[in-house]
Image (cartoon, rainbow, N blue to C red):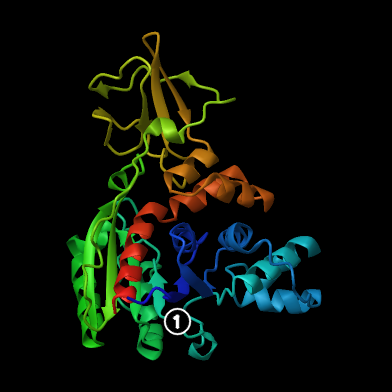
Amino acid sequence: MNQDVKLNVFEAFSGVGSQHMALRNINKKFKIVATSDIDPAATLAYYYIHKKNDNSYNILPKQEIINYLSKILIKSEKDLKKLSNEKLTELYIACVKTNNLGDITKISIENIPEHNLFTYSFPCQDISSIGTKKGLDQNSGTRSSLLWECKKIIENKKPKYLVLENVKSLTTGKNKQNFETWLRYLESLGYENYWKIFDAQHYGIPQRRPRVIVVSKLGKSKINLIKDNQFIHKSLNDIIDDKGKKWTIFNPKAKVKGEVKEGEVLFLDDRDWKINGVMIDKVSSTQRAGRSGLKLIKCENGTLYERKLSALECCRLMGYNDQDYHNMKQGKLSDNTIIRLCGNSIVVNVLENIFRNIYEEEEND
């Protein structure tokens, strides 16, 4: 058995680096050789969570920084010129230190370092059941069609392992054909695919968040790469922090199915979620993670109260540790921005499960 296994990872659509968090948490050898993201806030969050102690850098003149950032981030040169020198420098350092290659449609293969794990959680907005439903047809120009941009990377770099994560609706309805086409494409390159719908509530996190994960290995695998490992399950009480939080009386017109017991705290979302055996009907179409945030409901002295989850609580619901949140705050990211980034992220515990399997496979390969 080879215990000296190291994964070199290209983290595309990297966001705040949930893959990086998961690899960090399982205490295995790894190196993130490159990232790819066009969101300035996500890039700053990634830097402050993972790279803030790396302070060595060379500063370019302002216009050179603007030219550099305009090729990587979603901001135009005009918008970048409006930023202070301090913010421009901060964004520049964040991109350099995370080796952010930027827009995946513009990445040159020559600039991508060698890697044996490629992660590609492409945008879900056009395939999500609550998104635009524009689909992901190749060359359609939708955000979800960025999946097909990954072909050039996989074909040219042939990483040993691939990990795709997205909403479960990728596997159903009008998206199913594209999903199956993608799997056949990977098989044609010699990859063996394992896929499954993973739900965060089964991996130590008290929320329903079903997501499909596809793990692909170049060649035959010796183990089931999507098998389950043991997790310490947390309750909602492990997540919430009521200190200094203000609760308001719950909308009395909202219909509640089931009994909200005295002293019990439950989730409230715009979709019917059944948590701890209680289902609460939808109240509005805006109370979603990533926008205004999930809400909590509780019963005290026979009265129902509600409040939004804090940014720290949203981080905990995604499997981030508290220091990850504090690092983002050090980067002066607002709580609303952090909540949005959480909504776009991947539950870290689920990724830990996947990466443990990949390391086990590597150690026995």
Figure quadrant of residue 60: bottom right
Q: Classify the position of the N terminus by image quarter.
A: bottom left
Residue annotated with mark 1: 115
Using the rendered image of the protein, determine whether residue 72 is visible from the camera's viewpoint. Answer: yes
Mark 1 neighbour density, 10 Å: few (under 14) some (14–19) many (20 or more): many
Of all residues shown, which one is farthest toward the top?
Answer: 301
Query: Horizontal and vertical percent for residue 30?
Result: 48, 71
Of all residues shown, which one is farthest toward the front?
Answer: 1
Q: Image height check: is 112 above or below 90?
A: below
336 vs 279, left or right, is right
Residue at screen point 29% across, 63% down: 213
Residue 190 vs residue 345, the one in the foreground:
190
Give the residue type at disc 1.
Answer: His
Using the rendered image of the protein, determine whether residue 347 is visible from the camera's viewpoint. Answer: no
Residue at screen point 45% across, 81% down: 115
Figure quadrant of residue 188: bottom left
Residue 51 vs residue 165, the one in the foreground:
51
Q: Classify the position of the C terminus by image quarter.
A: bottom left
320 vs 145, left or right, is right
Query: Horizontal and vertical percent for residue 123?
Result: 40, 64
Query: Horizontal and vertical percent for residue 362?
Result: 33, 75
Q: Image height check: is 287 above or below 76?
A: above
33 vs 361, left or right, is right
Query: Horizontal and vertical percent for residue 264?
Result: 36, 21
Residue 365 vs residue 237, the one in the foreground:
365
Residue at screen point 27% across, 68% down: 214
